[in-house]
Image: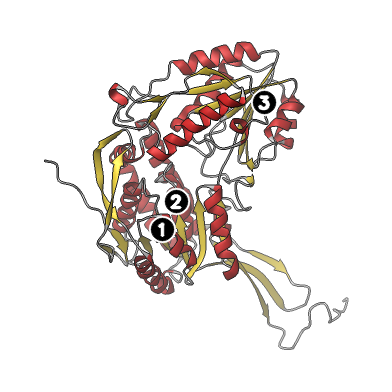
């Protein structure tokens, strides 16, 4: 018999069991017989232990020079490179995405770690001329304190890297709670940081449910800020909890992204982008292209090619290199996806491909759904407005670029959008008019790179951005400093300076 592995919380530099001794199971969504391991079912007491450890460690870590903090992160990046394949296999077992995408997830953590480590020597402030003589003015970044981080299951190493690494380079300490479905990838990441030499208490991991561990982390009076990625409903709860404490909070929530295909587009390229955007990661991305607006002049041709291409996608366990789509993350999400398919049918959209849960044969032990395409849909249908988070794409006919933009902006979210056209004028119009945080030309809605800001408008977030140098704004404050060496009291805006 295979020995069941039990994984612990990481608090104050030690791997410890939660106070209750209770654990929860992490099983492979492609094969429920495959028990990945047991993880700590933490409570508010465990969260408090982690926050207290982070609070103590902050007093020294904030004073450690940023370039030296960066050296530890560079070391962590190198360890990630060395263990990339091992971590990718673990990720596919617990999350289900195909192995090549899991490798990409780990690679994104590598890229983020190296990029942000470089900011250790580039956290520039500003100097400015004072309006008074013999006075010096400048601004500098300062850390916030203990950062509470809550991460989702769909990118279980990349997204934690977006939060932990910028927080650390700025001089903060962190307590992070992973999604219940994918705690192993974050355990692996924290082991890397430990091995790289991050001091005890600087990084703390507490696994458990949102109610039992996530909510206490948000409420804790010693967490200086909260960074959350997940559903819009939970994000709003986070915001409501933080507001009475005036606690800064960063929210990255839902998306209902669109690809616009104009009549002059390279159709084969657009189809390829729609397939990748709609069905990559089994549609379980906040940037997934769940809507495609196609000009009526090429609508029929596009649909035929799109359906034909998607029909060839192979569904199965992600560890099989020949598979294109892995499972849905869990039974609840599979039920949600299936429910939206039924909604689409009732609304009158035409089902052009798929639509069914896969239950037989190789699929009977997992949570699998066919790639599904609705066509001839109306933009006001729920399947065209609401985030489904599964392998379901809705195709919408439009008469013009202006109509495509109107459809694109008609949803409550504003994360990513894309246009396929050979007309540079139309590309720039769409680039200007689409109210989304990310925009692509002749590419799909997924594929963000770590050196540019990531995030969206409207219900997608609350105005902050991850990745790029803007990540530093989430995890630091500005301090303005004035040094008066005149030897006398000078009153800005009041004293008149003589003209020499």
Residue 134: x %, y % from top left: 73, 79
Instruction: Identify the residue under disc 2.
Output: 151
Residue 298: x %, y % from top left: 66, 13
Query: Is 470 placed above or below 264 here?
Result: below
Q: Helix, strand or loop at disc 1?
A: strand
Instruction: Identify the residue under disc 1.
Output: 176
- Residue 277 appears in the figure: no
Numbered tag placed on residue 415 in the rendering: none
Q: Helix, strand or loop at disc 3?
A: loop
Instruction: Tell me where residue 382 sits by quadrant.
Output: top right
Instruction: Identify the residue under disc 3.
Output: 378
> Is residue 134 shown left or right of residue 89?
right
Q: Looking at the figure, which quarter contains the C terminus?
A: bottom right
- Residue 362 appears in the figure: yes
Q: Helix, strand or loop at disc 2?
A: loop
**Residue count near mark 3 (Cα–Cα under 10 Å), binned few <14, some 14–19, many ≥20:** some
Mark 1 to mark 2 CA distance (whole Å): 8 Å
Mark 2 to mark 3 CA distance (whole Å): 34 Å
Mark 3 to mark 1 CA distance (whole Å): 41 Å
Q: Earlier in the sequence, mark 2 or mark 3?
A: 2
């Amino acid at each position: 018999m295979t020995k069941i592995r039990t994984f612990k919380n990481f608090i104050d530099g030690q791997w410890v069991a939660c106070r209750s001794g209770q654990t929860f199971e992490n099983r492979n969504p492609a094969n429920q017989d495959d028990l990945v391991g047991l993880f700590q079912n933490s409570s508010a007491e465990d969260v408090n232990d982690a926050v207290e450890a982070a609070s103590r460690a902050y007093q020294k870590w904030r004073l450690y020079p940023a370039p030296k903090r960066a050296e530890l992160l560079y070391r962590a990046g190198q360890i990630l490179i060395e263990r990339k394949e091992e971590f990718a296999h673990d990720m596919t077992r617990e999350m289900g995405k195909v192995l090549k995408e899991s490798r990409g997830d780990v690679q994104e953590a590598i890229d983020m770690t190296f990029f942000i480590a470089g900011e250790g020597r580039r956290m520039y402030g500003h100097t400015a001329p004072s309006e008074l003589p013999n006075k010096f003015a400048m601004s500098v970044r300062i850390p916030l304190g203990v950062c509470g981080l809550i991460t989702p299951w769909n990118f279980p190493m990349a997204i934690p890297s977006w939060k932990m690494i910028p927080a650390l380079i700025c001089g903060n300490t962190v307590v992070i709670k992973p999604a219940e479905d994918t705690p192993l990838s974050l355990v692996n990441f924290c082991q890397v940081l430990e091995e790289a030499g991050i001091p005890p208490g600087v990084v703390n991991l507490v696994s458990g449910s949102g109610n039992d561990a996530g909510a206490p982390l948000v409420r804790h009076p010693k967490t200086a800020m909260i960074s959350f990625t997940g559903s819009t409903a939970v994000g709003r709860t986070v915001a409501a909890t933080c507001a009475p404490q005036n606690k800064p909070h960063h929210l990255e929530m839902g998306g209902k992204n669109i690809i616009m295909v104009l009549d002059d587009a390279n159709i084969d390229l657009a189809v390829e982008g729609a397939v990748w955007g709609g069905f990559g990661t089994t549609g379980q991305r906040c940037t997934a292209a769940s809507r495609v607006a196609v000009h009526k002049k090429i609508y029929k041709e596009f649909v035929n090619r799109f359906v034909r291409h998607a029909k060839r996608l192979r569904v199965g366990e992600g560890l099989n290199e020949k598979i294109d789509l892995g499972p849905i993350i869990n039974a609840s999400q599979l039920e949600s996806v299936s429910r939206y398919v039924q909604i689409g049918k009732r609304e009158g959209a035409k089902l052009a491909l798929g639509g069914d849960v896969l239950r037989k044969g190789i699929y009977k032990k997992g949570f699998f759904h066919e790639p599904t395409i609705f066509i001839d849909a109306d933009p006001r249908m729920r399947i065209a407005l609401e985030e489904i988070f599964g392998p379901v794409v809705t195709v919408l006919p439009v008469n013009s670029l202006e109509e495509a933009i109107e459809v694109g902006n008609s949803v409550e979210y504003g994360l990513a959008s894309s246009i396929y056209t050979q007309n540079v004028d139309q590309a720039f119009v769409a680039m200007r008019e689409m109210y989304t945080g990310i925009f692509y030309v002749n590419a799909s809605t997924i594929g963000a790179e770590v050196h540019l800001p990531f995030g969206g408008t409207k219900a997608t977030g609350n105005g902050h951005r991850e990745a790029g140098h803007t990540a530093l704004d989430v995890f630091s404050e500005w301090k303005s400093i004035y040094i008066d060496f005149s030897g006398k009291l000078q009153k800005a805006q009041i004293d008149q300076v003589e003209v020499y």
